[in-house]
Amino acid sequence: MSSSKHSLRLGVNIDHVATIRNARGGAHPDPLRAAEMAVAAGADGITIHLREDRRHITDADLVALKNGIHVPINLEMAATDEMLAIALGQKPHAVCLVPERRAERTTEGGLDVAANQAIIGAICTKLRAAGIRVSLFIAADKAQIQAAKKIGADIVEFHTGPYAHAHGAAQLAELKKIQDGVALAAQLGLECHAGHGLNYHNVAAIAAIKPIVELNIGHFLIGEAVFTGLAASVQEMRRLMQRARGAA
């Protein structure tokens, strides 16, 4: 998402609206309707993960969202030929390459760019040639950041899961890793995003890291929407992010 009225953008991941729909089949709840509501409530963009097993978002959802909303779509996907072909066909604003295993409940770690530079670099090149911005979902690790720069990524999205799931001194140590990683990435000229496991209670410290320009948050917002409504959950997250940045 290259431009926004906000200095710190919020990308709302609507995967789990599709999870609820798919639990019974049919068309309800509609991810497109959720996306429209999120945007109306202050989301700067919509993030979706098109998984190999199509456990939540489907190909049809991607097409509907591409045609139905005016904000940028950030397509999370594995670095495979199948997904590359879909991305080149639909041309979302951005693609975030993520690791993926069928057995995992959610993305469990960062992409190992350093060990797979040839494969990931080739996909990166094809996506960028098509005018698609490329993000790599990585741990805040020096080798991964340097590899992302080497293969020509536009963006690195830092995996905040270890930080989000830690407590006390361990959480502070994970936060320091992210801060250091962001500093290095920014020095190398990479745009910095962050996401995974963020909620009302832990988002402030990440939002306060000024080189980060975008947070992608999904599971918590969709879960909170059960109790407060989607607009309210997005608005509260936006408020906390802006407060952490020192915005009025």
Image (cartoon, grey):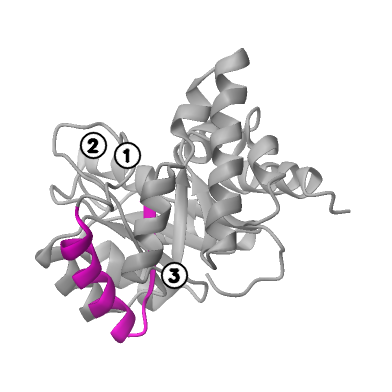
Picture layout, residue 220 above or below residue 171: below
The amino acid beneath tag 1 is Ile
Task: Give the label on residue 1, or none.
Answer: none
Q: Nearer the viewer, residue 49 or 160?
A: 160
At label 2, counting other C-alpha atoms closer than 10 Å, the crowd grade (few under 14, some 14-19, many 20 or more) is few
Q: Earlier in the sequence, mark 3 or mark 1?
A: 1
Labels 1 and 2 touching (C-beta < 8 A)? yes
Regarding mark 2 in the picture, which secondary structure is present there? helix
* Residue 37 makes an appearance in the image: no
Picture layout, residue 169 above or below residue 44: above
Name the residue beneath numbered marker 3.
154
Name the residue beneath numbered marker 1.
20
Q: Nearer the viewer, residue 227 or 97?
A: 97
At label 3, counting other C-alpha atoms closer than 10 Å, the crowd grade (few under 14, some 14-19, many 20 or more) is some
Numbered label tally:
3
The amino acid beneath tag 2 is Ala
Segment colored magenta: 116-137
Q: Residue at x 28, y 71 (%)?
A: 124
- Whether residue 12 is in magenta: the answer is no
Q: CA distance from mark 1 to mark 2?
A: 5 Å
Residue placed furthest toward the right: 248
Q: Residue at x 53, y 57 (%)?
A: 185
Regarding mark 3 in the picture, which secondary structure is present there? loop
Task: Give the label on residue 23, or none.
Answer: 2
Q: Residue at x 32, y 47 (%)?
A: 18
Residue 111 in the image: x percent, y percent? 29, 47
Query: Residue 135's image quarter?
Result: bottom left
Q: Residue at x 16, y 63 (%)?
A: 119
- Whether residue 131 is in magenta: the answer is yes
